[in-house]
Each structure stands twice: as C-alpha cells, then as structure tokens.
Image (cartoon, rainbow, N blue to C red):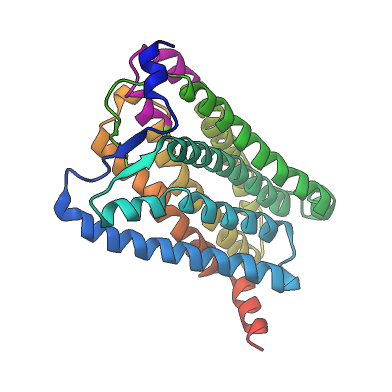
Amino acid sequence: MNDDGKKNATPEAQFVLLGFSDWPQLELVLFVVILMFYLMTLIGNLFIIILSYLDSHLHTPMYFFLSNLSFLDLCYTTSSIPQLLVNLWGPEKTISYNGCMIQLYFVLALGSTECVLLMVMSYDRYAAVCRPLHYTVLMHPRFCQLLAVACWVSGFTNSALHSFFTFWVPLCGHRQVDHFFCEVPALLRLSCIDTRANELTLMVTSSIFVLIPLILILSSYGAIAQAVLRMQSTTGLQKVFGTCGAHLMVVSLFFIPAMCIYLQPPSGNSQDQGKFIALFYTVVTPSLNPLIYTLRNRDVRGAVKRLMG
C-alpha cells in the first residue's frame, strides 16, 4: 500500500455517507417511512422470538429456525438503519472509519448468514413434507442446533474474508461513500488501485452464498411440489401451501434484490438504483418476514390464544 493509502485509512478518519442527499426533499419522508418499518421489524421479530420461546407447542425445528431468522433480521436492520435515520434527520452524515468497517463486517456477515439459514429452512420443510415418518430423526434438536451454528459461522467467516481484503485497499483522497451504509461495492469505488481482484472475490463468494442456496431451495420445493401433487388430503394441502408458500415469499424478497447488488461488478450498477434496492432488502424485507409467517399461520394464532388465556 502506498503512503497515501495508509494516510487515508487511518482509524481517526471519517467517511461521509451521501445516502439520499441528492433528493433533500425526500429525506424527511424517507425518515418517517423507514422509522415505521424499523419499528415494525423490532416489534414483529421480537413477537416471534418471545412467542416461540413461551409456547411449548412451537418448540419445533421450524420455529427454532424461524426464531433464528427473526433474531438475525433484528441484528441485520440494527447494523445499518439507526445510522441511516441519524443521517436523514440531521445535516451530519458522517461515520468514523472504525464504525464504517464494523458496519461493513456485520451487514455482510448477517446477510450471508441469512442466505444459508433460508436454505436450511427449506430443507426442514422438505423433510417435513417428503419424509414425514423420518422427520423427528432427520431434524433432531441437536442436529438443528448444529445447522444453526453452521449458518452463523459460515456467514461471519465469509464476511471476515471480504472485510480483510477491503481494509487493505488504499483509498483515494475523498471520503464520500455514495450509499447510505458502508458496503463492499461502495467502498471499492473509492479505491486508488485496480480492484478487479476484490470484485472477482466478491462475485465468487456471492455466487457461493446466493446461487448455491437458491438452487438447493428451488430443488427442495420441486420435491415438495411433487409430494403435494400426490396428496389426497385437502387439509394437508392447505397446511403445506401455508408454510411453504410463506417461506418461498421470504426467499424471493431476500434473494432477488441480493442478486441485483452482489452478482454484478460494482461498476455495473446504477448507484441510485442500487441504493433503493438495498433499501428494500435492509428495511422492507425484515419487516415483512414476521407478517408473512404469522398472518396465515394457525400454529401462531393458536399460540397467541393460549398465551392470552
């Protein structure tokens, strides 16, 4: 790294998160809308975690993984949204160098973890529908815990790799990040050197964490669809469509925006388009997950009734 790069990467330095400053008239509206979605995310996901813990009928693999997803979404939104709200509310749009690197690490770690967790949840649904007689053996509580640990460890390891590579990239004089949070593609645009190696690494690992889980999820649901078509029971069909339909909707809301951002080089993205896509999967998707999983779910409605006495 050259002296400029070292000087520019000092922990005392600050980045300016430009965010939506090109549309100052939108900032107040965005603040109100994002705050509402953030509160919905906090309330909805805490509700699922507490309900799954308190009601013994929900001590099943499906709700164990759903609680993990809710906790993950709470952490994921909290890693970027409070900073965005502060920046939208006031004239100061800065974040310290250390704060930026910490945010970059956690946003990427939690996003990678969610990709793997959604894949594990699809395997749980496959086992429940296609292997019902072996389900309790296949999804033993100890095995479920190991799967959950594997999701978290793989996501945080992937993020450590990218954070390390991004940390050593020398940055140019200006510190204006054209995004509302610190993410790898936005920071690579500030570099003074050729970042094709970083971009290639990002695309390869993103393919591993986005495309492979997506292919396995679609394979699971292909097998589930075949099993459903052979079912005679209308009640069974409704239950399968209820739980699997909810999961597929969550998968679509998360994977489609992620592919738009991470499966093309940073130079290939329109910055404004990228910001609004990122806004969708960091703000909207985590708030919709609790609604999708609970509104048409008889188990959750029954648990609420039991809890209310």
Q: Is residue 21 left or right of residue 233?
A: left
Residue at the spot x=57%, y=51% of the render? 72
Examine the rendered structure and indicate whether residue 249 appears above or below residue 276. Answer: below
Q: Quadrant of the C terminus?
A: bottom right
- Per the image, is 217 magenta? no
Q: In which image quadrant can residue 132 be found?
A: bottom right
Q: Is residue 82 visible?
A: yes
Q: In which image quadrant can residue 50 be found?
A: bottom right
> What x and y, as percent, mark residue 243?
59, 60
> What x and y, as percent, mark residue 224?
63, 48
Q: Quadrant of the N terminus?
A: top left
Q: Which sits in the foreground, 203 or 166? A: 166
Residue at the spot x=61%, y=62% of the render? 237
Q: Which sits in the foreground, 299 or 196? A: 196
Name the magenta segment's main secondary structure: helix
Q: Is residue 208 left or right of residue 30?
A: right
Q: Is residue 205 visible?
A: no
* Magenta-highlighted residues: 184-201
Examine the rendered structure and indicate whether residue 177 appears above or below residue 95. Answer: above
- Per the image, is 189 magenta? yes
Examine the rendered structure and indicate whether residue 94 appears above or below residue 189. Answer: below
Residue at the left extreme of this rendering:
25
> What x and y, as percent, mark residue 44?
51, 67
Residue at the bottom extreme of this rendering:
309
Q: How many marks?
A: 0
Examine the rendered structure and indicate whether residue 139 appears above or below residue 238. Answer: above
> What x and y, as percent, mark residue 227?
66, 50
Residue at the right extreme of this rendering:
137
Residue at the spot x=46%, y=24% of the render? 166
